Amino acid sequence: MKYLYLFNNESRAAQYGIGTYIRQMISCLKREDVYLLNIVNIDSADKELQEEYNDGIRYINIPAIHGIYRYSERYYKNIAFLLFQYIEEEAECIFHFNYIHHLLLAKRLKQRFRNSKIIVTIHYFNWCSTLQGSISYFCSILWKDVKERNSFEANIFKEWLRDKELLQSVDRIICLSEVTKKLLVEYYDIVDSRISLIYNGLQDEAQILSKEEIFLKKKQMYFRSNEQIILFVGRLDVVKGIDFLLEAFREVLNQISNVRLLIVGDGEYEEILKRCTGLWGKVTFTGKVSKSTLYEFYQIADIGVMPSFHEQCSYVGIEMLMHGIPLIGTSAIGLGEMILRELCIDLEEKDDMVIFPVDKLSTLMINMLVASSKEKYALIERQRYKERYSLDVMSESVLECYENL
């Protein structure tokens, strides 16, 4: 029996995509009787190291520390020593990481457990958020002479060097998009054969409503029955393109009156609310909601919009496809390959900027709202979910990846 250690970080990111990924991985692996599953939670809220068992899974919770040694080599060296007492030295282990900076710990574990294999899933690169997903600006930083880089660019270059070294030390890299795979090969010098492209997957929990049921659901939620709903789900963050969505929505209202923008997610509201001046009667903010409430919003949405500058393999996008919602999105890293070509907004990279074509977004939203083909798109999106983003597809690919180590 092989031991599988899945590493998590109980941080803000774990509330979003990576936390969902861990839960889906657990669902995948519980179906099989091949691996003894262990979850290692770094930065746990526990005051001291805890070991507990739940539903046949062992959880090792490592408390957070604060100060200058957090995420340092010394910090990961100490975590490694803590873990040594829980792992048999001759055991056949797979250590599966989800944060690049945790690979400092991976090096220590590999030195101790010679029979082990190291895997990391790339959920994000820090520079993608910092540079709004601009690959051209990222490349220009790498190509510059050291004297030409400002302090901001020097930090990105330093982080790239560190990530490159760490990624080259692992046995297998799982990436969530074709673009990321290409980046790993071209800019991190990773051999193609060591990379597995495995899209995120979700269990099918969609309940598709009839037109009559949608009418009743809207009535229960006090939306007007004849009001079309544009749905945005995500953090109220610059990288999510919320500013451009509001700007484009103004143009939509100039041509279509029976439409509402429903914004689901938390973040900094003050600046966003200022941008809603004159739109207040047509924009609804819900804040962060429960999964059950979110899925009700999916049931009544006419179109979904993801104007992001950077994603990898968005769970929000998968949920919208799963519910058969026509999805408009950008060509951003990771997101572009989730969007149908005719519903995709091409971002333009120019020098150190990414230009967002607001007029294209408003045009696509208007065209989709007035189109008679929404039902056709709903069927297409739902089928794309089944073929590429279901939990069954993900599970099969993950298990194959482990077996081929």
Image (cartoon, helix red, strand yellow):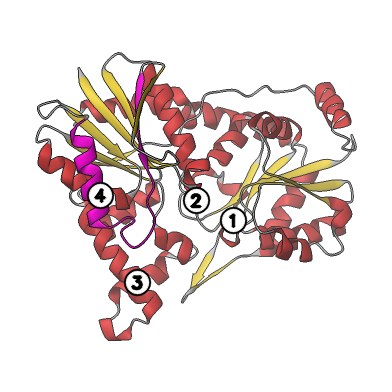
Q: Residues within 10 Å of mark 3 (few under 14, many from 20)?
A: few
Callouts 2 and 1 close, C-beta under 8 Å: no
Residue placed most toward the observer, 2 or 179 = 2
Front disc: 3 or 1: 3
**Horizontal side of residue 101 vs 123, given as left or right:** left
- Disc marking residue 76: 4
Mark 2 or 3: in front is: 3
Q: Amino acid at mark 3?
A: Asn
Question: Residue under circle 1?
Answer: 240
Residue 146 lies, with reference to residue 228, above or below; the image says below
Q: Secondary structure at mark 2?
A: loop
Type of residue at label 2?
A: Glu
- Sort mark 4 into few (<14), some (14-19) or many (20+) by Cα contacts within 10 Å: many
Question: In the image, what residue occupies the spot 25% across and 61% down?
Answer: 162
Q: CA distance from mark 4 to mark 1?
A: 32 Å
For the residue carrying disc 2, how many other residues have a C-alpha within 10 Å: few (<14), some (14-19), or many (20+)? many
Q: Is 76 one of the magenta-colored residues?
A: yes
- Seen in the picture, residue 173 relative to 38 is either above or below; the reply is below
> How many marks on residues?
4
- Which amino acid type is marked by label 4? Tyr
Distance, label 4 to label 3, CA atoms, is 22 Å
Task: Looking at the picture, tell me which residue is in the foreground, 340 or 219.
Answer: 219
| Residue 192 at least partly seen | no
State the CA–CA distance, disc 3 to disc 1: 23 Å
Give the labeled residue for mark 3: 155
Frontmost of labels 4 and 3 is 4
